[in-house]
Amino acid sequence: MFESARFATQEDIDTFTFLHAMSRSLIAEHRGGDYWLVKEALQNSGESLFTEVQQSETSVCIMGLYDDCPVGFLIGEIYDLLDATAVDICEVFVEPDARAVGVGETMMDSLTDWARTQSATYLTSRALPGDRALKNFFERYRITARLIEVARKL
C-alpha cells in the first residue's frame, strides 16, 4: 500500500465527479463552508469543471491515489501576482478515510513541481476558519496567511 499522485486523464472524469460531489457534501461540516460554496468554490458541476480544467492551458488537475486507487484531487491555476507568476490551489480534497497517509502531500509535491515548470514563484490558496487540518497542511508547505477575510451577518 502506498500513496502517489498523477495528472488527471480523461478516464478520471467519473471518479473526479464522485470525489467533487463528496467534497461539496462534506464542506458543510466546516464553519464558513456555506460562504465558501457561494463565493470561492469553482462553480461548475464536477463533470463540467473536470472538462474545463482538462482543456485549460493554465490549470491542472492532479489525482491523489492510495494503492493506485484515486481518493483525492487538487486543482491548481496559474495567475499573475505582484509582477510574478503564481499558482493558486483552487481546490484540494482527499476522502476522509484516506487522510493522514500522505496522499495530500504527494499531490502538493506534484503541484509544486508543475508550478516550477511554469516559472511560478508563489503558491496561494484559502482555508476555512474551522479547518485546522487544512491550515496545518498548508503550513507544512510554508503557505501561510497573508489576508484574513472577515464577515458579519446583519
Image: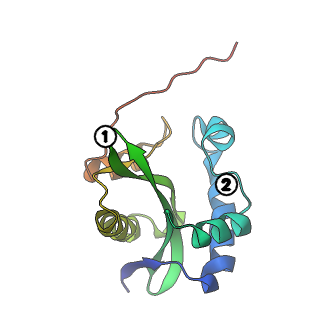
Q: Decide which of 61, 138 is in the foreground and name it.
A: 61
**Rendered residue at 72%/69% (across/down):** 47
Q: Secondary structure at mark 2?
A: helix
User: The C terminus lies in which quarter of the figure?
Assistant: top right
> Circle 1 sits on which residue?
144
Residue farthest toward the top in the current orientation of the protein: 154
Q: How many numbered circles are shown? A: 2
Q: Is residue 64 left or right of residue 18?
A: left
Image coords of residue 73 (percent x, y): 52, 67
Amino acid type, mark 2:
Arg
Q: Residue at x 62, y 86 (%)?
A: 11
Left or right of residue 77: residue 2: left
The picture places residue 84, in percent across and down from the top left corner, at 31, 46
Q: Secondary structure at mark 1?
A: loop
- Residue corresponding to mark 2: 24
- How far across and down, in percent of the image, does residue 21 sit? 69, 62
Specify few, some or many for label 2: CA neighbours under 10 Å numbering under 14, 14-19, or 20 or more. some
Query: Would residue 101 be seen by someone viewing this image from the given angle?
Result: no
Q: CA distance from mark 1 to mark 2?
A: 24 Å
